[in-house]
């Protein structure tokens, strides 16, 4: 009989460690779920994986390649939707090319409106991408210049919520050489930033709820995974403007993390309630669980469905385990106090208080470790 009581006592004392172990397991599983995602998908659907690689420096351009200089200016960014991962932007894009490229365009009958396409543009029925003038403007030394105006909705393929709500938001605008005659099958044409490119964003480049950090303009070579019924693999030169915003850390902390900390503070202080008040003690973790569920549901209302847990989601998961463990602990404590003989009530109270104190210490340490490991892992 004594051995059974000792085993039960040991099991209850090991409960906090078990819960913390589950939290660590969640971190490990979520951290390793996506590692093979891209390679696995490429091997499953394609003979050759799609790739976007940095374009070689302009000094390494071959004689049989053409160069088109480009620039982008965004007037305003608006209508950001995290749920659909889209945003709207208006602005201008311009290109400049030499006489040799112009001869290629005339030979292949490529008009300026067919020269470029916006890769991540969506809802084309409500979008604008058109040249300012019907014919390119002739410049000195046989060069040509064409400016385009765009107003469109774009898909954000760079969004990453792993550190949400303390994340960075990258909004890309991607333009690419459109004609197949300018890919690597024929005389490849490469995009390079215009040497007179100075400003990327206008005064309306700010985005509500985020702080503008910087804008980065880069060029890449986009290798498509499909041959589109042809015999060669298309490789197109791609210009990518990435507008980078940061969430306001203080605002994110007050809106999302602070309510969670307050709820968990109430949960972890509840063992201070006398062990004889079993009904009161049992009500605290069950109420906290409901509060945590509603908080997380509100948090996900404007976020898309994700194949991984965000930083805040992992804090919620750890909080659920602690609250559930506390409910089990209070159930045990209530039973111990109720079943104790009248002359053993004080001893039962001291025993409950010791276990409660251990649970508090382990839970605080575990929550801190989970928060730190999650932050470093993302």
Image: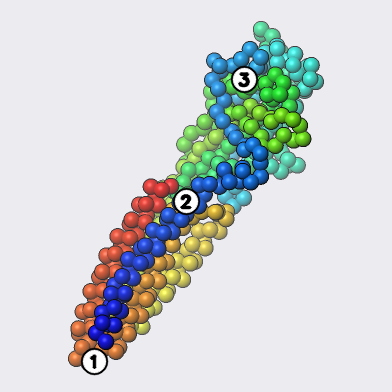
Instruction: Name the residue that disc number 1 marks.
Output: 341
Q: Is residue 339 left or right of residue 343?
A: right
Q: Secondary structure at mark 1?
A: loop
Q: Is tag 1's residue or tag 2's residue first in the polypeptide sequence?
A: 2
Which residue, given by chain and number where applicable, does mark 2 sit on?
A: 32
Numbered disc 2: secondary structure? helix
- Residue 39: % across, % down: 57, 43
Q: Is residue 94 above or below residue 36?
A: above
In terms of depth relative to the viewer, which is nearer, 318 or 139? 318
Which quadrant would the N terminus be assigned to in this image? bottom left
Please state the horizontal and vertical placement of residue 111, each as a whole percent of the image.
77, 23
Picture residue at 23% right of the left edge, 74% below the top? 354
Query: Residue 184: where, in percent of width, then height?
Result: 68, 24
Alpha-carbon span between mark 3 and mark 2: 41 Å
238 is higher (above) or lower (below) than 153: above
224 or 357: nearer the viewer: 224
Q: Nearer the viewer, residue 65 or 323?
A: 65
Estimate the spatial distance between the alpha carbons at disc 1 and disc 2, rounded to whole Å. Answer: 51 Å
Residue 266 in view (yes/no): no
Of residues 86 and 102, which is closer to you in this image?
102
Q: Residue furthest bottom?
A: 342
Q: Residues within 10 Å of mark 2 (few under 14, many from 20)?
A: few
- The residue lying at 62 percent from left, 31 percent from top is 222
Write the residue at 63% across / 46% down.
Answer: 44
Which tag is nearer the camera, tag 3 or tag 2?
Answer: 2
Q: Write down the quadrant of residue 87 in the picture.
A: top right
Q: Which residue is under mark 3?
A: 69
- Residue 311 appears left or right of 80: left
Question: Callout 3: 10 Å neighbours few (<14), some, many (20+)?
Answer: some
- Inter-mark Cα distance, 1 to 3: 88 Å
């Amino acid at each position: 009989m004594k051995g059974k009581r000792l085993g039960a006592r040991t099991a209850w004392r090991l409960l906090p460690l078990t819960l913390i172990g589950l939290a660590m397991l969640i971190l490990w599983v979520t951290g390793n779920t996506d590692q093979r995602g891209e390679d696995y998908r490429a091997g499953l659907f394609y003979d050759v994986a799609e790739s976007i690689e940095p374009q070689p420096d302009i000094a390494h351009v071959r004689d049989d390649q053409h160069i088109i200089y480009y620039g982008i200016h965004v007037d305003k960014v608006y209508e950001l939707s995290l749920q659909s991962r889209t945003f709207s932007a208006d602005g201008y894009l311009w290109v400049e090319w030499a006489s040799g490229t112009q001869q290629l365009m005339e030979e292949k009958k490529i008009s300026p409106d067919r020269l470029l396409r916006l890769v991540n543009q969506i809802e084309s029925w409500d979008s604008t991408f058109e040249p300012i003038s019907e014919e390119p403007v002739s410049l000195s030394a046989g060069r040509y210049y064409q400016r385009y105006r765009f107003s469109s909705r774009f898909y954000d393929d760079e969004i990453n919520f792993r550190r949400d709500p303390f994340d960075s938001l990258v909004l890309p605008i991607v333009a690419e050489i459109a004609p197949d005659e300018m890919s690597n099958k024929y005389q490849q044409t490469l995009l390079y930033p215009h040497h007179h490119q100075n400003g990327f964003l206008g005064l309306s480049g700010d985005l509500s709820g985020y702080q503008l950090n910087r804008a980065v303009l880069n060029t890449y070579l986009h290798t498509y995974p499909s041959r589109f019924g042809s015999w060669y693999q298309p490789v197109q030169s791609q210009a990518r403007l990435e507008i980078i915003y940061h969430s306001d850390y203080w605002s994110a902390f007050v809106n999302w993390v602070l309510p969670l900390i307050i709820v968990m503070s109430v949960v972890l202080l509840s063992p201070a309630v006398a062990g004889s008040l079993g009904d009161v003690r049992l009500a605290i973790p069950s109420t906290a669980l409901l509060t945590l569920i509603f908080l997380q549901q509100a948090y996900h209302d404007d976020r898309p469905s994700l194949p991984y847990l965000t930083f805040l989601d992992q804090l919620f998961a750890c909080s659920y385990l602690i609250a559930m463990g506390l409910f089990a602990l209070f159930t045990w404590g209530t039973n111990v106090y109720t079943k104790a003989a009248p002359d053993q009530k004080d001893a039962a109270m001291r025993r409950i208080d010791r276990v409660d104190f251990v649970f508090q210490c382990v839970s605080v340490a575990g929550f801190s470790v989970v928060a730190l490991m999650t932050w470093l892992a993302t």
